[in-house]
Image (tube, grey):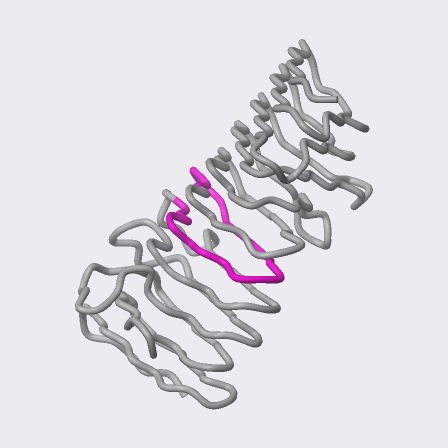
Amino acid sequence: AAGAMVLNEADAVTLAALDTFDGNITVVTGGSAEIGTINAGLGTDDVSLTVTGSVTDADDNSLITVDQLTIAATGSIGAAAGLAINTTATEYQSVTAGGSIWLNETNGVVATNVVAANGLIDLKTAGDTVLTNVVSTTDADANDVTVVASAGNITVGVVNLAGATLGDVTLTATLGSINDLTANPDVVTDIYGDVVTLTAATGVGSAADIDTAANTLDVSVTAAGAMVLNEADAVTLAA
């Protein structure tokens, strides 16, 4: 059957299993949230988590299945060392954190708005990945943005804070290409950072050139494909 779920938890909580299969899920917590299984299906239903604290997966058993995912956390989302929040989502409609963000998507995803106020962003996907707005809003050396798509292409809207010069950006399309979300001609900067590393199998900017504002560019095409870059300033072209 179909129906929504709305929960308001006063304290920290473990969300072991929340299932509607066909209905929105909304959870507000007064403390951190440990994620187990959250399933709203892949129809048109949404999951919204508003967390005072961090969103965690200490046992590496999380899975959020949803069409559109919204998370707002005052702390971090996920953690390093294989403890990212696992998702099967169509869209990250809005994923925001006070600290760092680690996400592991089982397919491709549209990252409409992924923002870390002061932390790194680490996103792994397994299909076509659209980075509409993926930004760490505090320019610091530790606040890197890393996206690895093990399959499919990466399309870039905006990655990193405008004017950022300290955090690095690394985008890897293991089997596909990396292109601008906006078709040529377009000179609006897509990627800001200190060291910008772009690695793709079948081309970087070959369909729509990548516009960068970087101190150092390290760009590789590992199979057959063109490379077209538009750098706003002086730059070091690394080997």
Judge by depth and name the residue closer to the eye, 179 or 98.
179
- Which quadrant is the N terminus positioned in? top right
Q: Is residue 192 visible?
A: no
Reply above or below: 61 against 145.
above
Which residue is located at x 61 percent, y 68 percent?
Answer: 150
Vertical comparison of 77 with 135: above or below: above
Q: Residue 127 occupies which quadrant of the picture?
A: bottom right
Q: Residue at x 29, y 80 (%)?
A: 228
Does the magenta run of residues contain 131?
yes
Q: What secondary structure do most residues of the magenta stretch adopt?
A: strand
Quarter of the view holding residue 25: top right
Name the residue rendered at 50%, 35% in the picture.
97
Q: Residue at x 26, y 67 (%)?
A: 211
Frontmost residue, 78 versus 110: 110
Residue 147: x and y in percent read: 52, 60
Relative image position of residue 138 (x, y in whole percent) = 37, 44
In this picture, which residue range is highlighted in magenta? 115-136
Q: Depth check: 238 or 64 in front?
A: 64
Tell me the quadrant of the picture where the C terminus can be found: bottom left
148 with respect to 104 (left or right): left
Horizontally, is 180 left or right of 49 in the view?
A: left
